Amino acid sequence: MNYFKSFSEALKSIKERDFDKIALELFQWQALHNPVYFQFLEAMGADPKNVSYLEDIPFIPIEFFKSHKVYCSDQHLEEGFFSSSGTTGMQQSKHYYWSMEFYLSHCQRLFESQYGPIDEIHVLALLPSYLEREGSSLIAMADHFIKLSGSPHSGFYLNEHEELLSKLENLCQSNKKVLLLGVTFALLDLAEKVERPIPCPQLILMDTGGMKGRRREMIREEVHGILKSAFGVEAVHSEYGMTELMSQAYAKGEGKFNLPFTMKAFIRDPYDPYALLEEGKVGAINLIDLANFHSCAFLATQDLGKLDKQGQLEVLGRMDNSDIRGCNLLVSG
């Protein structure tokens, strides 16, 4: 059994108390077996033997996924990758995956841990910008959820706003939960077509982020205020994921994400990559994603955020001078 398969099996039974131990073991393994990470550590003058705590781990800049194949090269990979959307002429991030089957089952497990069985939910996906291109990890996840739902009403939508609203109104007559998963600008476009709020207490309205230049940038509170008013919901849920991550985090309101059992976040000083900030302080987000066991689990993102006392992650936007991707989250005030 190769390392990837054994690690993927181990993730199924991981306990929170084991996270640090497993992450440190994975770091030592990737430091040797990931050529790009190995060279990065050498360039940083970092000796893996001297790393005893998670806080000591050097996090690779997420931009490396644009210029390098970031994966552990002595293990078998499927011939496939996820790619970021970006804009015309912008270099895309590529994340080569070990197994599509693993990715989809992992997505399912993380989602169901927060929202219950997918086969008890109608899944409506309003993801036009992602649906119009290949290589989106979000589309792969949504398509998997649609199929698993077993509902003849589940499906993707591009710009069929009237059809989608009619479908939503009909589904809200039953007691079965409805997930409306949408990119920000598309949800706002749909909200403008709502003539009166649709009473639907079982609706999970989930924003995946992203304006993609379709609308002016708005703070999260403004966007979610518009959506709550249009759809008559008390909270707008959010999904935090990106091409370079195999895991996703979910927020059930107020943009505060509950990190899954495979992830841990640290907040770093934007001007000093080795200086970590205490809870409540705003800085750049470093992420450990154990589901990235085949590539690199230790990522320095270009997102700004902070951690609260409960360990929830609030994503506040993007750092200056970093190019905007399609999965870019809203700037929050």
Image (tube, rainbow, N blue to C red):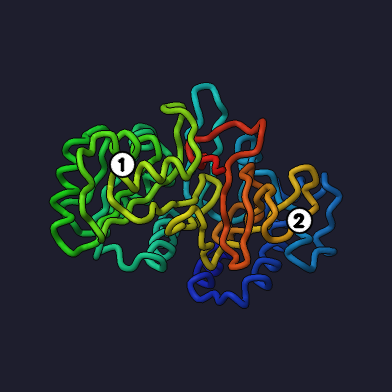
Q: Is residue 229 above or below residue 51?
A: above
Q: Position of residue 308 (x, y in %)?
A: 62, 62
Tell me if residue 278 can be seen. yes
The amino acid sitting under disc 1 is Leu
**Left or right relative to 111: residue 295:** right
Q: Which mark is residue 276?
A: 2
Q: Which residue is mark 1?
A: 126
In this rendering, does residue 131 appear at all? no
Of labels 1 and 2, earlier in sequence is 1
Q: Position of residue 144 (x, y in %)?
A: 32, 54
Q: Looking at the image, which is closer to me, 300 or 311? A: 311
- Residue beneath the point at 41% across and 45% down: 224
Q: Residue at x 80, y 52 (%)?
A: 274
Picture disc at residue 270: none
**Secondary-structure class at tag 2:** strand
From mark 1 to mark 2, how far is it between C-alphas?
37 Å
Residue beneath the point at 58% across and 74% down: 16
Question: Is 56 drawn above or below residue 285 in the view shown?
Answer: below
Q: Find residue 62 and report its image quarter.
A: top right
Q: Is residue 44 above or below residue 173?
A: above
